[in-house]
Image (spheres, rainbow, N blue to C red):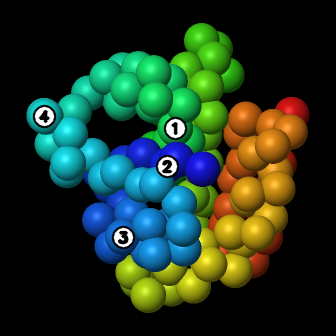
Amino acid sequence: MKFLVDAQLPKVLAVEIQSLGHEAVHTSELPKRNSTPDEDIASFSDLHDMIVVTKDSDFVTSHLLRNTPGKLLLIATGNISNPTLIRIFQKHLPEIEKAFFDCVFVEINSSSMVVHD
């Protein structure tokens, strides 16, 4: 799987995703870095068949109304430490991997995961 981690999430999440065997890019690695507009992030992820990982509800709106980004992982944890975020992601990764074979929008929070149809 390929992930594009949005600017409001730490780059360490992209590094952790890579260490878990997946491709991952953080927006800080894009040409406009963390100033990359949401539309460009969505276009880049769609072009490269990537899952956008974000806390930004604007991506949810864009996904639901315009089907872009085509694949979305919403992190709905509120403000938490980076180590806590990494633990939550690691805990849910097997479910995330399975879910994205059949769906295009997944949400994780501190204790659970929701697969949206």
Left or right: 112 with respect to 11? right
Task: Indicate the position of residue 64 as horizontal and vertical percent values.
Answer: 67, 22
The span from disc 4 to disc 3 (Cα, nearest Å) is 19 Å
- For image coordinates 50% across by 85% down, the residue present is 84
Q: Amino acid at mark 1?
A: Met
Q: Earlier in the sequence, mark 4 or mark 2?
A: 2
- For image coordinates 76% across by 69% down, the residue present is 94
Question: Mark 2 falls on what kind of element?
Answer: strand
Q: Closest to the observer: 58 or 68?
A: 68
Q: Earlier in the sequence, mark 2 or mark 1?
A: 2
Q: Is residue 13 above or below residue 55?
A: below
Q: Amino acid at mark 2?
A: Phe
Instruction: Identify the residue position indicated by label 1 in the image.
Output: 50
Q: Residue furthest top?
A: 66
Q: Amino acid at mark 4?
A: Lys
The span from disc 4 to disc 2 (Cα, nearest Å) is 18 Å
Instruction: Identify the residue position indicated by label 3 in the image.
Output: 15
Question: Mark 1 falls on what kind of element?
Answer: loop
Instruction: Identify the residue position indicated by label 4 in the image.
Output: 32
The span from disc 3 to disc 2 (Cα, nearest Å) is 11 Å
Residue 35 visible from this viewpoint: no
Q: Closest to the observer: 91 or 47?
A: 47
Q: Closest to the observer: 23 or 63?
A: 23
Q: Which dot marks residue 3?
A: 2
